[in-house]
């Protein structure tokens, strides 16, 4: 007996929905995963990536390991040392990770990952007061240094206000000739000059190296704050904003002027960080780290991926949610869109640009692109050349929009680069062809439908609960697949058709 396709779809969809929900319940009940965001401690995953090129001969890499301060607690740490000898050592009260190898003939990447959370205090502990070593200066720089320090002392009452005034001049660009001469125009050397000025003024100071924790950041470099001793306490300043105090989202990696990374036998070394924030309970994180291999078949999770890829999947896992919105609007409501999945990509762009800014960018670029496309159509270009020309024009429009917005002080519009350039170009091409074949009315309908679907998808994908569930329970995508299969067999009336044929249901007509 042959089973009908409708019954097959129903069986398959039922199995998929049950499987996805079953795995979700398993992770909730057995592993303690929270179904709602914010129920547990926020846990940050930091992955440091060390890359370098060997130059021949023995290779030795030394990485200073963090000693958590200001309320940060390390839950667990892992090292990737495939093919290298590895050990952790303690030197002068500081821990170091050591990788060594006799020879290496290719570019290599090493990883160090740690799980951390904040316990609720933001004060740095005591630290040895460093010896003040006056900088060695040429006669002209010495004279400039004396005038700069004298000028700062006139406007400062103590070492704290002295440091704040110095950093404020740098941030606001209000430097006199002597200060500008000392600091020059090299941004990367300004911190060392700040330390020289403080040392010349007799103020004990040291750098504080660490990472600003921002969810989803990749290839992030280590930042450095300035820390001074005022005679009683250590005071911290952000050298880029001149703001006093330790930022809440700053994870201190090292205090002092010692090197964080040393590479012997290599060149072009880099230390980069990838960061992901989770809302899992601490016990769950520990359980996952210890038991992931034993429960691999049931507890499949993207936490086993490198942190950089985790940040990518945090956005990718939202795409099926946007796709469901498009399916519902097209199959049940009857909204016509320009393309099936173009609204999803526009919704992803809105997440980066915010809704209002994204709408302005989209309407501006598409409107200008359509006008230029009509001009190109008069030149009778071939399809490939025409689309390529539209792509180039769209990129130029986006660049112009970014420059103009920057000059006007609207920094938010600089996120225009997140818009899918090729999709915009193809949308312009499709709409122009549709205009020629069906007229402007159909373009208005499909364009409005696409924007409606994109806005609704954006609103749903921006909900914290949706982002939390898709990232921590990716098995829900299996259930979502079952729902989409069921919707795919729907062949009844759409809402717009019920409205269109409403008079047929009225017996008095």
Image: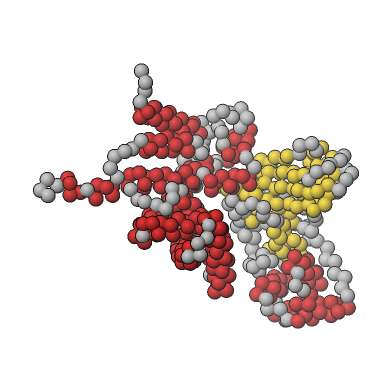
Q: Is residue 219 above or below residue 245?
A: above
Residue 97 in sight in this render: yes
Give the image quarter of residue 309.
top right
Residue 352, image x, y percentages: 52, 57
- Residue placed most toward the observer, 179 or 426: 426
Work out which residue is located at the far top of the displayed protein and give it: 1
Residue at x-position 39% and y-position 27%: 8
Give the image quarter of residue 189.
bottom right
Residue 67, image x, y percentages: 72, 49
Q: Quadrant of the N terminus?
A: top left
Residue 178, image x, y percentages: 77, 80
Residue at x-position 44% and y-position 59%: 432
- Residue placed most toward the observer, 125 or 302: 302
- Residue placed most toward the observer, 3 or 15: 3
- Residue placed most toward the observer, 402 or 266: 402
Q: Is residue 323 above or below residue 138?
A: above
Residue 408, image x, y percentages: 54, 74
Residue 22 in sight in this render: no
Q: How many marks overall?
A: 0
Residue at x-position 44% and y-position 38%: 480
Task: Name the side, left or right, on which 194 lies relative to 429.
Answer: right
Task: Name the side, left or right, on which 415 lies relative to 7.
Answer: right
Q: Is residue 60 above or below residue 391?
A: above
Give the image quarter of residue 97.
top right
Residue at x-position 66% and y-position 72%: 171
The colour scheme is secondary structure
Task: Name the side, left or right, on which 190 lies relative to 474.
Answer: right
């Amino acid at each position: 007996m042959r089973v009908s396709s409708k019954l097959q779809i129903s069986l398959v969809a039922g199995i998929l929905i049950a499987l996805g929900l079953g795995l979700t319940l398993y992770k909730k009940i057995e592993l303690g995963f929270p179904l709602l965001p914010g129920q547990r401690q926020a846990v940050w995953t930091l992955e440091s990536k060390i890359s370098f090129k060997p130059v021949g001969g023995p290779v030795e890499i030394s990485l200073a390991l963090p000693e958590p301060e200001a309320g940060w607690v390390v839950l667990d740490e892992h090292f990737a040392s495939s093919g290298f000898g590895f050990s952790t050592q303690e030197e002068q009260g500081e821990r170091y990770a050591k990788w060594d190898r006799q020879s290496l003939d290719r570019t290599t990447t090493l990883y160090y990952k740690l799980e951390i959370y904040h316990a609720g205090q933001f004060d740095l502990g005591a630290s040895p007061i460093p010896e003040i070593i006056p900088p060695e200066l040429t006669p002209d720089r010495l004279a400039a240094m004396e005038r700069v320090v004298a000028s700062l002392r006139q406007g400062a009452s103590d070492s704290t206000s002295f440091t704040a005034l110095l950093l404020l001049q740098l941030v606001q660009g209000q430097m006199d000739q002597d200060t500008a001469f000392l600091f020059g125009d090299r941004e990367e050397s300004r911190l060392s000059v700040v330390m020289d000025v403080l040392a010349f003024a007799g103020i004990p100071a040291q750098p504080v190296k660490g990472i600003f924790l921002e969810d989803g950041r990749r290839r992030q470099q280590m930042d450095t704050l300035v820390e001074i001793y005022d005679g009683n306490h250590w005071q911290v300043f952000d050298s880029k904003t001149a703001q006093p105090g330790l930022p809440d989202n700053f994870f201190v990696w090292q205090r002092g002027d010692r090197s964080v990374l040393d590479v012997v036998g290599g060149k072009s070394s880099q230390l980069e960080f990838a960061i992901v924030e989770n809302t899992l309970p601490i016990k769950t994180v520990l359980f996952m780290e210890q038991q992931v291999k034993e429960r691999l078949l049931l507890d499949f999770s993207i936490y086993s991926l490198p942190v950089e890829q985790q940040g990518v999947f945090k956005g990718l896992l939202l795409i099926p949610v946007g796709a469901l919105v498009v399916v519902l609007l097209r199959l049940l409501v009857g909204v016509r869109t320009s393309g099936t999945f173009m609204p999803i990509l526009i919704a992803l762009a809105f997440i980066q640009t915010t809704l209002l800014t994204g709408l302005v960018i989209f309407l501006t670029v598409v409107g200008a692109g359509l006008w230029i496309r009509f001009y190109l159509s008069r030149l009778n270009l071939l399809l490939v050349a025409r689309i390529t020309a539209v792509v180039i024009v769209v990129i130029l429009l986006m660049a112009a929009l970014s420059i103009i917005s920057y000059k006007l002080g609207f920094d938010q519009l600089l996120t225009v680069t997140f818009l899918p350039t090729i999709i915009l170009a193809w949308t312009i091409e499709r709409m122009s062809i549709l205009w020629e074949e069906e007229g402007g009315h159909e373009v208005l309908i499909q364009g409005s439908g696409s924007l409606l679907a994109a806005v609704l998808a954006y609103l749903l994908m921006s909900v914290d609960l949706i982002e939390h569930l898709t990232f921590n329970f990716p098995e829900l995508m299996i259930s979502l697949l079952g729902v989409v299969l069921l919707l795919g067999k729907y062949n009844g009336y759409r809402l717009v058709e019920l409205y269109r044929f409403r008079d047929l249901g009225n017996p008095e007509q």
